Image (cartoon, grey):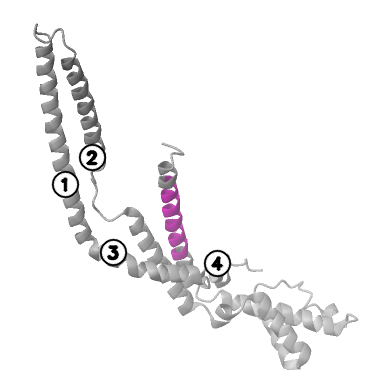
Amino acid sequence: MRRKKILRWTRIRGLGELQVLTRASYFLLFIVPMLAALWPVIQVGISQYNFAIGSSVNALKYTASVLEFQSRKLEEQSSSAELAEGSIADDLKHVLGEVRSETESLRELLVQSYVEDSSLPQSWAFLFFASLSIFLAHLLYQSFAPPLVREVGIDDYVAKRKSEYSKNPTPRVLQEALSALRHSKTVSNEDPALSDTAKIIPSPERWELDTIEAGSRHYYNSKAEANPTAITVAASLYFVGIVLILVVIVEQSFYVGEAAGWWK
């Protein structure tokens, strides 16, 4: 008895028929390259933004140095005899200290706002290649998967065949099912549908329906195993696309949690 194949079109049929996944991949295949084409313009805006931030930081740095100089000069003057008795110098020193502190804080904030990396976001690249993988996998599924597998599931197909035979029991249909079972390498010699004793059980109609069911299942599975190379490549592409999407979801979830203060 031959071992059943792990990869079949039926195992990726759900992904191939998932409209949300395919439509999202088509959308991202269009929008991400368009954003990539416009990214040089965005980089110019980022460069101008960084230039403005750098100019502001330099201005604040100069202001902080001026305030530091004035604070030291005032401190030297306050130690002289003329200002030793007054409180104006102390008040001015206090004000200058606060302004200098606020200036330093603002400068540090602007430095943190500086955009160091102006390249296309990594998550966008992941989403593009995920969409490309899913698109190629879907293209292989539509091109190489048998129409029978794409149009109907195995349970629905078997139920339809049994219903058709119940309404119109013809020897030809039964003979086709028996022939499919006899020539199938996946069927054991002890299959009840092929045994001699199965033909003399009290309910021949039940045996016939069981034979139609078994034969239909083996026929459907044989179709589901067609083009094994295409099945392997399509399954691999779907796997790569889903993994890349999960990487983006985990990465963005981490950034959202960090922004919410859940972790540092």
Q: Secondary structure at mark 4?
A: loop
Look at the image and tell me in which quarter the C terminus lies.
top left
Q: Amino acid at mark 2?
A: Leu
**Residues at badges 4 and 2 in contact (C-beta under 8 Å)?**
no
In-image side of 151 versus 97 (left or right): right
Residue hosting label 4: 7
Asked which quadrant contains residue 80, the reply is: top left
Camera-side residue: 249 or 57? 57
**Residues at badges 1 and 4 in contact (C-beta under 8 Å)?**
no
Look at the image and tell me in which quarter the N terminus lies.
bottom right
Disc on the earlier residue, 1 or 4:
4
In-image side of 72 versus 246 (left or right): left
Label 2 – label 1 distance at C-alpha: 10 Å
**Residues at badges 2 and 1 in contact (C-beta under 8 Å)?**
no
Q: Amino acid at mark 4?
A: Leu
Could you say where residue 187 lies in the image, as x and y percent from the top left? 69, 73
The image's mark for residue 128 is: none
Disc on the earlier residue, 3 or 1:
3
Of badges 2 and 3, the one in the foreground is 2
Label 3 – label 1 distance at C-alpha: 24 Å
Magenta region: which residues? 237-254
Label 1 – label 4 distance at C-alpha: 57 Å
Of badges 4 and 2, the one in the foreground is 2
Residue hosting label 2: 110
Q: Amino acid at mark 3?
A: Leu
Could you say where residue 114 lies in the image, as x and y percent from the top left? 23, 43
Could you say where residue 256 lies in the image, as x and y percent from the top left? 42, 47
Disc on the earlier residue, 3 or 4:
4
Disc on the earlier residue, 2 or 3:
3
